[in-house]
Amino acid sequence: MDKKEKEKIPSGRKPVRVGISLGDTNGIGPEVIIKAFSDNKMLAECTPIIYGSTKTMSYHKKAINDNFFVYQRVEDANNAKDRKVNIVSCWSEVVKIELGKPTETGGKYAFQSLKHATEDLAAGKIDVLVTAPISKETIQKAGFEFPGHTEYLADMAGQVEALMTMVSGDLRVALVTSHIPLKEVPAAVTKEKIVQKLKAFSQSLEKDFGIIKPKIAVLGLNPHAGEQGKIGEEEIETIHPAIAQAKAEGIMAFGSFPADGFFGSNQYNQYDGVLAMYHDQGLTGFKALAFEDGVNFTAGLPIVRTSPDHGTAFDIAGQGKANAQSMRSAIYLAMDVFRTRQFIKEANADPLPISEKKQYKGKGKREE
């Protein structure tokens, strides 16, 4: 959401309850949260509910010499106050923080924060979830059994998988495969999976971003998109048949396109979304264009979850160098998606209650 869009927001609109998991306690997660809410203008649109502890946040606040971040402690998210930064205490003990070091302790409390936040999301205590970055290495040592947030949330929702989507303004890049080794990608990129992802992506562009008949560009798997089979057969045998099936089902899918030229020539501006075959193919182009304000959005779920597109950045943790723009963008995108879903739901709702329908029953018939 840009500055002009924010100026159009009705002042009386109800704030969105934004739950925020702390991320790794030794990384930059707490720092970018602090910096994002040092600007009180954020509080006009959302009620932030941070899952962690006041002691942990106080430690990070002192580490970066922040004088603007003000918060209050609440025992339960239901007690959160509007126009205030609220911290739900997920633990009472003093956490050993070792800034810049990937430790099991940092992963343990990142998992504890995430677990508490997702439970509250499922219970309806918060409207959306924004996750600060985790270290997959440390959180998995603490018992986290998933490759990342996307897979964890999909499992919580009872789905096999969700759609990892990177967003920056009108640039939206989704992935067919995400956190798997590169050598496993060709076998994982099947016609069925591409069609499934195209359906999920098209639906998300419609219901989450309000785009009517979205146009989706599909990238090839091989260099030069296979060059008519000279550099691989996957485009001819798998990707093109998937695009054809998606089109037959009403999805506006086009391609396949060579990834390098597609991003390098600004061709992405002609489409509402881009479907990449694997993690680095999509994210390398995306982050080259939008590293400062990019957002990771988990599409295809009944809940709304976003995250900054950067990692824990242990190398600069506690030094006050972290840029909070991606976190700020993640918060605004979560609110935008939540409100877009609400608007579409209300627009499609039956305007007449059952009691009024009964009054109209039989009217319009010719009397004998």
Image (cartoon, rainbow, N blue to C red):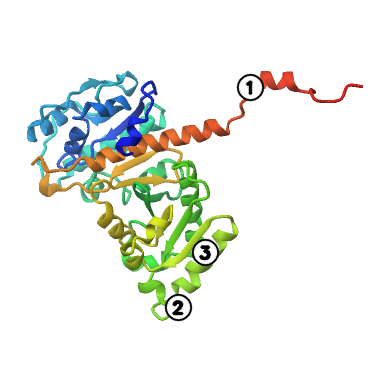
Please give the residue where the numbered disc 1 appears in the rendered image.
353
Nearer-N-terminus badge (3/1): 3
- Quadrant of the rendered structure where residue 110 is? top left
In the rendered image, the quadrant that contains the N terminus is: top left
Are dots 3 and 2 in contact, CB under 8 Å?
no
Residue 132, given in percent of the width and then of the height, sits at: 25, 40
Residue 56, given in percent of the width and then of the height, sits at: 15, 31
Q: Amino acid at mark 3?
A: Ala
Residue 45, given in percent of the width and then of the height, sits at: 33, 27
Residue 203, given in percent of the width and then of the height, sits at: 50, 47
Please give the residue where the numbered disc 2 appears in the rendered image.
228
Q: Left or right: where does residue 66 sit relative to residue 232? A: left
As drawn, the residue found furthest toward the bottom would be 230
Instruction: Give neighbour class at mark 2: few <14, some 14-19, many 20+ (Cα, 10 Å).
Output: few
Please give the residue where the numbered disc 3 appears in the rendered image.
242
Are dots 3 and 1 in contact, CB under 8 Å?
no
Secondary structure beneath label 2: loop
Q: Amino acid at mark 1?
A: Pro
- How many callouts does the rendering have? 3
- Residue toward you, 186 or 35: 35
Secondary structure beneath label 1: loop
Instruction: In the rendered view, tell whether residue 292 sits above or below residue 188.
Output: above
The structure residue drawn at horizontal position 40% and vertical position 71%, both measured from the top left corner, is 225
Instruction: In the rendered view, tell whether residue 361 sits above or below residue 245.
Output: above
The structure residue drawn at horizontal position 25% and vertical position 48%, both measured from the top left corner, is 140
- Residue toward you, 107 or 194: 194
Cα–Cα span, label 3 and label 1: 43 Å
As drawn, the residue found furthest toward the right would be 368
Answer yes or no: is residue 118 visible.
no
Nearer-N-terminus badge (3/2): 2
Cα–Cα span, label 1 and label 2: 57 Å
In the rendered image, the quadrant that contains the C terminus is: top right
